[in-house]
Image: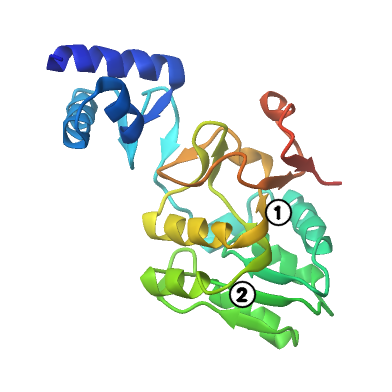
């Protein structure tokens, strides 16, 4: 197939789907991965699409690689996040072995865990410190500390997480769409999130309404891989059976 023909197919697919992965294009075009990546790079440079980690998205499909700091995120939609966090905390029983992801909404759960008898594992230093001060048994994942989100990431963190089998896991996200699933700007953090989700029997994503329709650079879980806890469900997602509206 000629290069221009591949370009036309890629752009038509993006017009229909808004986003596509390298793997999907490799199969549809019957081309090598290197060829597909070169095509995406060329079209990105030509201003025809936006190249993202693992694929491409249409120009009018919003994608962000920006990661706000913990301080910046903590003040956004705070009351909504508190309601979600309170509900999430109520799901934890004394017999649970819980994975608690780094993040501001998961951090707000700590306010409602006084007297909890469950055991926690987290990759957030601040979460671990707070839980320990509350007299709650907690294990802190080891590895590289990411300053902007105060999360522990890296291969060592992944190896430790793979040792555990959690009854419940609570995660934050930067974006949610049906097609791209749950996304975050940082590859290393996405890998840790994805690894932890696979080790959980029940997975919960805690999110305010602003994250729906947003896409960050890296997918860490599919849209149906978790139950989504939110206070307000956008109209276009109200038919989704895995979204739980908290009160």
Q: Mark 1 highlights which residue? A: 78
User: Left or right of 59: which side holds 74?
Assistant: right
User: Left or right of 123: which side holds 167?
Assistant: right
Cα gap from disc 2 to disc 1, whole angstroms? 24 Å
Residue located 86% across and 46% down the image: 247
Q: Is residue 126 above or below residue 18?
A: below
Q: Is residue 82 above or below residue 146?
A: above
Q: Secondary structure at mark 2?
A: strand
Report the front residue among 78 and 102: 102
User: Within the image, what quadrant is residue 223 found in?
Assistant: top right
User: Which residue reaches farthest right?
Assistant: 247
Residue located 67% across and 80% down the image: 130
User: Left or right of 48: which side holds 157?
Assistant: right
Could you say which disc has been placed on residue 121 in the image? 2
Q: Quadrant of the N terminus?
A: top left
Residue located 22% across and 30% down the image: 36
The number of callouts visible is: 2
User: Left or right of 189: which side holds 31?
Assistant: left
Q: Is residue 48 visible?
A: no
User: Within the image, what quadrant is residue 35 found in?
Assistant: top left
> Mark 2 or mark 1, which has the lower sequence index?
1
User: Horizontal and vertical percent for residue 174?
Assistant: 53, 47
Q: Is residue 17 above or below residue 201?
A: above
User: Horizontal and vertical percent for residue 152?
Assistant: 46, 71
Q: Secondary structure at mark 1?
A: helix
Q: Is residue 72 visible?
A: yes
């Amino acid at each position: 197939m000629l290069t221009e023909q591949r370009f036309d197919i890629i752009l038509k697919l993006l017009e229909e789907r808004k986003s596509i992965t390298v793997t999907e294009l490799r199969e549809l075009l019957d081309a090598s991965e290197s060829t597909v990546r070169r095509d995406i790079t060329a079209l990105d440079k030509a201003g025809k699409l936006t190249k993202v980690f693992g694929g491409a998205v249409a120009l009018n499909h919003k994608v962000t690689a920006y990661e706000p700091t913990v301080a910046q995120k903590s003040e956004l939609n705070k009351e909504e996040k508190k309601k979600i966090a309170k509900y999430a905390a109520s799901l934890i029983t004394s017999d649970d072995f819980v994975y608690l992801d780094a993040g501001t909404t998961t951090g707000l759960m700590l306010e409602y865990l006084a007297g909890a008898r469950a055991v926690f594992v987290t990759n957030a230093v601040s979460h671990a410190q707070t839980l320990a001060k509350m007299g709650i048994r907690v294990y802190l994942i080891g590895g590289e500390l990411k300053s902007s989100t105060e999360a522990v990431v890296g291969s060592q963190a992944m190896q430790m997480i793979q040792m555990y089998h959690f009854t419940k896991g609570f995660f934050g996200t930067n974006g949610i769409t049906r097609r791209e699933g749950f996304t975050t700007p940082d590859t290393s953090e996405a890998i840790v999130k994805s690894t932890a989700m696979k080790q959980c029997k029940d997975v919960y994503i805690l999110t305010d309404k602003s994250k729906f329709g947003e896409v960050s650079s890296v997918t860490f879980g599919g849209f149906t891989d978790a139950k989504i806890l939110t206070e307000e469900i956008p109209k276009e997602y109200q038919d989704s059976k895995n979204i739980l509206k908290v009160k």
